[in-house]
Amino acid sequence: MAQPRVLVVNNGTLSLKQLRGRFEELGSRTDVVTASEVPARLDDRYQAVVMSGTKVRAYDRDFYRPLIDLVTGSRVPVFGICGGMQILGVAHGGRLADGPQRVGGYEVQVDTEDPLFAYVKPSVTVFHRHTLYLQEAPEGFRSIGRSEHAPVEFLRSDDGRIYGAQAHLEFRRDGLEILRGFVQLYQ
């Protein structure tokens, strides 16, 4: 089988190099575009889409419309990380709210029956760098991870194709193992 390709949508993350490195470490090639450069269709070029974190708020639905159309219209697994998850949440009717500033490692409880968490224990330590949180899973999604400060640390669509993580999974060992679970969805 050919090496899987992942389309990484760079929404302005400060850790693009680390994010790409994690997917390449797990056996996938990565191509990068910005949200304003996303293709109209994936065709068969990519086996997954990853939406990076962002330096801007996820409220600009018009700006992110081509990205959301691509994600919802494709058949491949999708993973929104930090701001990427917030973009997905807002696009599907979720609400964001300011919360405590968190930078560093934080403990999160995850639903280990979900395939995303096949390689981790029920309590993981993941890296945070933000102050904005999704307050509840929007319609068509559910929370599959929670913490003291965030009721939606991890998000999954009802059909199991679209995932989101509040944390930056490109850092820390548990983050790598969660990404390993995602990679198993398309390899």
Image (tube, grey):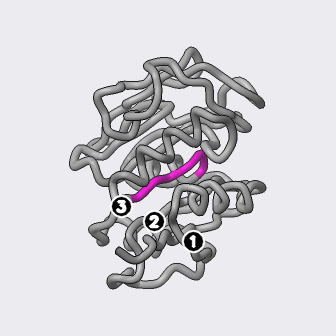
Q: Main secondary structure of the magenta part?
A: strand
Amino acid on which disc 1 is placed: Thr
Residue at left 31%, top 34%? Answer: 114
| Residue on which disc 2 sits | 49
Residue 40 appears at what percent x and percent y? Answer: 41, 84
| Residue on which disc 1 sits | 30
Q: Residues within 10 Å of mark 2 (few under 14, many from 20)?
A: many
Residue at left 51%, top 36%? Answer: 134
Q: Which residues are magenta?
A: 78-83
The image quadrant where one finds the C terminus is bottom left
Indicate left or right for 73 with 22 as reference.
left
Looking at the rendered image, the disc whose residue lies closer to the viewer, 3 or 1, is 3
Q: Earlier in the sequence, mark 3 or mark 1?
A: 1
Furthest residue to the left?
Answer: 159
90 shown above or below 137: below
Q: Earlier in the sequence, mark 2 or mark 1?
A: 1
Residue at left 60%, top 57%? Answer: 25
Amino acid on which disc 2 is placed: Val
Furthest residue to the front?
Answer: 1
**Mark 2 touches mark 3? (CB < 8 Å):** no
Q: Which mark is residue 187?
A: 3
159 shown above or below 142: below
45 shown above or below 16: below
Q: Residues within 10 Å of mark 1 (few under 14, many from 20)?
A: some
For marks 2 and 1, give the CA distance.
10 Å
Q: Earlier in the sequence, mark 2 or mark 3?
A: 2
Residue 15 appears at what percent x and percent y? Answer: 74, 55
For marks 3 and 1, give the CA distance.
14 Å
